[in-house]
Amino acid sequence: MANGFSPTGGHTGLLDLEALIRADYERCHPEDSLEDLKRRACFSEEDRGLLGDWMALAASRAKARRSETPARTAAG
């Protein structure tokens, strides 16, 4: 996929990314779970797109967190 996310797994750090969005997804979709969405994404183009959107948000959040964390130097 264009965003580097594969709904069937294989993405390093996938569980970390999911942790960044799980509560928000389940709050926005109270009758659903992220796990259910992931299962449906294997069969449904619409759900695959929705999952891709949420995972893009997770990647954006992860990038923002990395930029907020000061880099450690070898001397420090």
Image (cartoon, grey):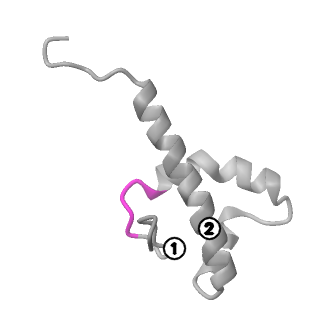
Q: Tell me which residue sits at (81%, 54%) in the image.
A: 28
Looking at the image, residue 53 lies above or below residue 17: below
Q: Which numbered dot is residue 23?
A: none
Mark 2 and mark 1 in contact (Cβ < 8 Å)?
A: yes
Q: Secondary structure at mark 1?
A: loop
**At 14% across and 19% down in the image, what residue appears?**
74
The amino acid type of the residue labelled 2 equals Leu
Q: Is residue 74 left or right of residue 61?
A: left
- Mark 2, residues whose alpha carbon is within 10 Å: few (<14), some, or many (≥20)? many
Q: Residue at x 76, y 55 (%)?
A: 26
How many residues crowd around disc 1 within 10 Å: few (fewer than 14), some, or many (20 or more)? many
Q: Residue at x 51, y 46 (%)?
A: 60
Percent of width and height locating residue 46: 68, 80
Left or right of 1 in this view: 73:
left
Which mark is drawn over residue 51?
2
Q: Main secondary structure of the magenta part?
A: loop
Label 1 to label 2: alpha-carbon separation: 8 Å
Could you tell whether 9 is left or right of 21 in the image? left
Can you name the residue that lies furthest to the bottom here? 43
Label 1 belongs to which residue? 7
Name, please, the residue furthest toward the top: 76
